[in-house]
Every structure is written in structure tokens, then in C-alpha cells.
Amino acid sequence: MTVAKDVTVTEDLLRIEGLTKTYDGAVRAVDNVSLTVSKGEIFALLGSSGCGKSTLLRMLAGFETPTSGKIYLSGQDITDLPPYQRPINMMFQSYALFPHLNVWDNVAFGLRRDGMAKDELTERVESQLKLVQLTKFAKRKPHQLSGGQQQRVALARSLAKRPKLLLLDEPLGALDKKLRESTQFELVNIIEEVGVTCVMVTHDQEEAMTMASRIAVMSEGYFLQIGTPDEVYETPNSRLVADFIGNVNIFEGEVVEDEPDHVTIRCPECLHYVGHGITGTAGMEVGVALRPEKIQLSQAQPDKPHNWCAGVVTDIAYFGSHTTYHLKLDSGMVLKVQQANLRRNCDQDLTWGDRTFAHWRRDVMVVLTQ
Amino acid sequence: MIVKLLPRLRRSCTGSRLVIGLPMIWLFLLAAAPLLIVLNYSLAEMDVASVNSLWQWADQALTVKLNFSNYLFLSEDPLYFKTYLSSLKYAAITTLWCLLLGYPFAYFMARSPAHLRPLLLMLVMLPFWTSFLLRIYAWKTLLTGNGLVNNSLMALGLIDAPLHMMNTPFSLTIGMVYAYLPFMILPLYANLVKLDLSLLEAAADLGASPWKTFWLVTVPLSRRGIIAGSLLVFIPAVGEYVIPELLGGPDTLMIGRVLWDEFFSNNDWPMASAVTVVMILLILVPMALFNKYHDDTVGEKV
């Protein structure tokens, strides 16, 4: 038993306990946050600007002193350690490359501070440059590189010291959309190749979903939900999370039937039949979250008593891979429906002003009590 | 003909040419032309009370007579050499002290809260509101035998007899550093305030202590401010006249005073001009070096 316990203890690389940061004695940027990150994980802090995710990251790096709480790295309390003594490296949003040093010296900067022997240093820097495919650019100054190349120098520099923990602050925020998509995968590949544990901050849910193994959704200084990308997407625990991650339709209604294997929820728009039990009671006010891509459209009225509604098409947005329809229901609610364009030139008969039916399966909704 | 010329004229007289041309004319009239006049005088000869012209027209021949005796005399009399050297020395000492005092000053000004900076900047510039001459004169009353400094030190019992501070290298240096400090602080501040603080964080993140970060990041990135401030102090300090006159003594030789003597006491304009030309050359060398250095780093965004 004790052996098993030891194993779990060593696997927890980063442990945060009740971390709080208060500015000017009033504003709580980070509010009593606790978290454990295992070795090898890529953990994303996701939230809109001002939610406290950057402050939390800066406390991990040592740039901000927590008002209260503790940070442990492999069991060692590092809360009061200055940044230059922490075995943690950060990739800055602006990359913060030293403009007076070339690529090689930028990567070597941290190693030189450790007084690494010359041969070892040369070898390490070259292997880092190889890792990010910048060997040819070693003698260039940062301003002579493109945004994507600068980003890779920043990554090589932050990985050069083989940190126990790598912090990424909006790692792809400064890149344009096309480059961002290809870099996401490249970045994850490199991080996994090196095997470093990683905490990243992002406001882009797509970035968090593709890169992270676990996501913490933050709002107003605390965690709304922590889970794997699909957990957070498919089973959000609150309206805030459901709304923040992806697109969602939320029906407000009342539980009318509460059975162990199903519940029925009456909303002004329709009757929901949810194919699983919930922790609630009949008469309870709940929200029913329904993702746009889980809804089907049909011209004919579905012959079931629940999980469908009728509406008028008010908006059609064609995205190439899919089309988003906005249906105005009789209650006034606008239902977002996403249909994959499986065939070329699929001549959808639907057009503005058409009345159509939306229906969905009994196992695609999430009942939200918060 | 005119029809053909007009478009060409219009093309050459575009706004940009005017914008560049006007300051060039200004520079020529107010900087280059006086310099040429001085150069002209330095090669002329003194004829009792007036200066002979270099150019003479006689017997259908234009004779240009360049007289290098002033320059020869400059190189022969060791006093001039010593004075130039001493001027450079005091200018260098002043620059060094201004840098040592001005850098921390500018650094903390740049790091102070944004709403305090205009006030601090104001405080640096405040002395300019009083006459330069008065401010230097005030140092005289502070540093004399029974001046404020000596009296205070004696009242505190730190010294028994008044210290001899006036008309020494000490008083000269104090006056020069005091007068030129703002010229060091302002360009340094302008440079340091632009420094990207995330670079300092990056250095700390990579294991550099605050002291190392200062030397490895802050100082290299502020070198342009350092160079600009040093030139702004060094160049006028070499030719300084008022401060050595008021605060200096017999052993603080400076070229400004020699110039004054040649010009007003000896009334020897050619000699005074020669002294000036050599001084300008002495200053042009560091300027040229700076320009070369500046060109080397062009394109580097700091």
C-alpha cells in the first residue's frame, strides 16, 4: 500500500494549495485556487481576459507573489523562491527574445547562467536548435526572423534548461490563424518529444482543446471546471462552462418527471426527454444544453412526442465544411443548428424564411443545475 | 523650352526636397559657414591690430597665403598640449561621474509609477529655470573657506579647520558634473523608459539574478542612451569656459580659458582660431566613432 501511495505522490509534479492573489487589498485576481498537475501532462488554463489565468501563471513563474497559499513542485515548497531559482521556464506571449543577442546566444542564455561547461553547452544549444529546425538561423538576430521562427526560438530557449515545468503564455497568440493551426500540432509534438510537463494559458478554446490533456476553465479568479477536453465539452457542469466552450443552445425549463433512467423537462419551446438520470427532483428549474452540431433538421414533422421543435430559418452561414442555421422558434428563442456538408454542392432546400423541424436524440443533452 | 522645363522643375522642387533643403541651408549658414570663417582666421597672420586677408590680388595674380605658424606654435608649446589633455581629462571625468550618478537616477525614474514620471522629469529640468551663471556662482559660496559646507562640517565637529575646496580639481569636477548631469539623465531616461520589462522577466526566468540581468540585458539594451548622454556631456565639457573660470584654479587648465585669453587678452584672433580648430577636431573624433557605431546597429529594433 505504501509503495502505491509513494508512486502517486511522485507523479504529482505541481501542486497548488489555496492560492490567492489580491491586488490593492480588494480585487481578487486569483481566488483560493487548488490544483494538481501530473508529470507529463499538458494542462491548459482557459478563460477570457481578466479571469486571473495570467496572474496564476505568473505566480508559478515567480513574477508575482501570492497573497496566500502554497505552490509545490515535486513536493518542494517553491512559493517564496525567486524566479531565477525555480526549475521552471516560461515561453512569453511576446516571446521576449533578447534583441541584442542572436538566436544561438538567446538559447544559450539560461545555460550560461548555470555555468554549464562549454562543450556541453554547445551540444545542448545545437540540439535545441535542431529540435525547432532553426540550425540555419543560429547567427540571426531576433528581428531578422518571422513570427513563427521567433516563436520557435522562444520555445527552444525555454526548453534549453530542461525545466521540470514549462509555462506557455498564450503560446500561439501572436501568430496568424493559418500558422496557428499547424504550429499547434508542432508544438505539442515537440513538448511530447521532450516529455516536459506543461501549464499553458490561453483564451482560445480551440487551442486549449487541441493541445491540452486537461483544461481548467477559469472565471473571476476561480476554476469553474477541470477536466479533459471532451469532459469539459460534452459534460459541462454549469451554464458558464457550456457557453464558454464552443457553441451551445440552452433551454430553460422545469423537471416534470424524475426517474432513475430518464427525466423529462418541460421548456416553453418543447419537451425534453433525457435518457439518463440526474441529481435533482421534480419541479426543479434546470437548463438543458444542446450543442448545435447534435441537432438534425427535417422537412417532415418528427413522429415522437419530445426532443423536437419547429422554427423559421432567419440566418444561414456557410462555412465550407459545415453550415450554421439560425431557427427562430415560436417562443422567440433562436436555435443554432450546425449541419455538416457531407456532399459537394449539397443543395439544401432550406432558405431564409422556411419553416422547418429540428430534432435530436435523447442522449445528446446536458442538464445544467448551475 | 519653358514648357519642357516646368515639369522637371516641379519634380525637383517637391515638398520633401524643401523640407530637407531648408534645414540644410540653416545648418550651412549657422554651423558650416562660421566654422569656415574660423578656419580662415586660423590660417591668417596678425598685422599689428588687424588680421591680414588670406587672399591677395596683385599683378593679375591671386595669391593665397596660408600661414601655418599658429598650428606650428600650438605643437611646439607644450602648454597647449597639456591644456588639451587636461580638458579631455576633465571632460572624461565629468562624463564618467555623470554616467555613474545619472544611470541609477534615470533607471529609477523609468521604473517609477507612470503618474510620477512627469514630476520627476520636471525636477531634473527645474535647475534650467535659474541662470546657469548664478547656479555655478552658488557653488562658490557653498565651497569657499567659510562657506556652507565647511561651516556645517565644522559645526558638526567633523573637521577642525576649513577644507580647501575652491579652485581645485574637486570644485571644478563638482561644478561640471552638477551642470551637465541633466544632459546625461534625459537621453538615458528616454531610452530606459522604453525597455520591454518582459525581457527582464525572461532573464530572471532563465536563471539570471537581478544584478546579472542588469548587466546582461538592461545595460546592453540602453547603450544608445549611454552613448547619446555621454556625447551630450563630453562635447560641451571639453570646451567649457564658465565653470573652470569660476570654480577652477591654477592647476585645472582647460582649453576654454586659453581660448579666452588668446582672443580677449592677447587679441590674437588667428591663434585663438587655431586653438578652436584643433579643439573641434578633438571632438569630431568621438563623434565620428559614434556615427560609425550607430550605422552598424541600424535596423536593430531595441
Image: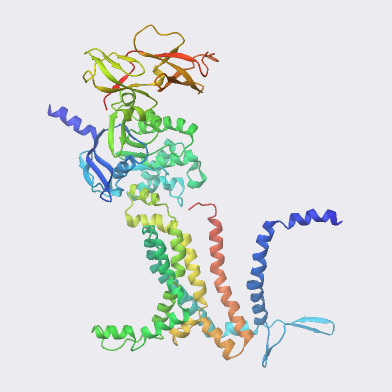
Q: Is residue A192 above or below residue B224?
A: above
x, y (%) of residue B4?
84, 53
x, y (%) of residue B204?
34, 50
Which residue, as the protein is rendered here, is positioned at the far bottom? Answer: B48
Q: Quadrant of the N terminus of chain B?
A: bottom right
Q: Quadrant of residue B41?
A: bottom right
Q: Residue at x 33, y 14 (%)?
A: A271
Q: Which residue is nearer to you in this view: A175 or B291?
A: A175
Badge count: 0
x, y (%) of residue A90?
35, 42
Q: Which residue is nearer to you in this view: B202 or A229?
A: A229
Which residue, as the protein is rendered here, is positioned at the far right? Answer: B1
Q: Is residue B119 left or right of residue A29?
A: right
Q: Which residue is nearer to you in this view: B12 or B80?
A: B12
Q: Quadrant of residue A28?
A: top left
Q: Residue at x 80, y 80 (%)?
A: B62
Which residue, as the protein is rendered here, is positioned at the far top? Answer: A303
Q: Is residue A123 above or below residue A300?
A: below
Is residue A115 in view? no
Q: Is residue A265 above or below residue B28?
A: above
Is residue B285 in view? yes
Q: Is residue A34 left or right of residue B206?
A: left
Q: How is the image coloured?
A: rainbow
Q: Is residue A178 above or below residue A312?
A: below
